[in-house]
Amino acid sequence: MNIETTRLKLRFFQDKDAEDVLAYLSSPTVNCFVHDRITTIEQALALIHKRQLQQDYIAVCLKDTDQLIGELFFMPEEDSYSVGWNFNAAYHGQGYAFESVKSFYQYLFDTVNVRRIFAYVEVDNLPSQRLCERLGMRREGCFKEFISFVNYPDGTPKYEDTLQYAILKKEWLLHK
């Protein structure tokens, strides 16, 4: 898979991405990525090899330099796809997430013929909520204490309230 936008290239992961993977997964900015935390290049390479085999993660790279700045991930469920994203904090606020997710959604709707795309977003992750809304997704609901990614200092799980956003293909066609 190779998708190109004005500034970005979406492709599968390569071994050369290890340092950049380490850069954003050594200190995840959102609790849902804590389980992906890595601390060494060897761990980054192992993760890349896993992603190469499973092909459910897509590298988001700067088009001019091919430098990895983040990732999209997805899970098919019949004619729907669950999609998420994780970006290096150094590239937040520059429109890269919107540009890459929009082009990936377009690919899913046009090429894969997906009927519905949805995303889970933690209630305190305001940038991802805004991204979903910019993409024309509607907030479908809030799952109270849906999942735990981290523990409180006393060792008990901290359960996250999680929002679900979604968009149908027919809504996407009207929105774009």
Image (cartoon, helix red, strand yellow):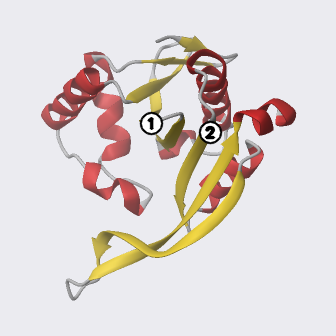
Q: The C terminus appears in which quarter of the rendering? A: top right
- Asked if the residue at tag 1 contacts the one at tag 2, i.e. Cβ–Cβ closer than 8 Å, the answer is no
Q: Identity of the amino acid at label 1? A: Phe
Identify which residue, 129 or 120, lies in the foreground: 120
* Residue beneath the point at 54% across and 38% down: 80
Q: Relative to 26, is 89 on the left or the right?
A: right
Q: The residue tagged with tag 2: helix, strand or loop? A: strand
- Label disc, if present, on residue 44 of the rendered structure: none
Q: The residue tagged with tag 1: helix, strand or loop? A: strand
Would you identify the image quadrant in which residue 43 lies? top left
Residue 175, relative to residue 4: is it above or below?
Answer: below
- Label disc, if present, on residue 116 of the rendered structure: 2
* Residue beneath the point at 39% across and 62% down: 31
Across and down, in percent, residue 112 comes to 56, 20
Residue 98, relative to residue 32: is it above or below?
Answer: above
**Residue behind mark 1:** 74
How far apart are the two marked residues, 2 and 1, measured between alpha carbons?
A: 13 Å
Residue 62, relative to residue 172: is it above or below?
Answer: above
Identify which residue, 40 or 103, lies in the foreground: 103
Q: Identity of the amino acid at label 2? A: Arg
Residue 123, relative to residue 9: is it above or below?
Answer: below
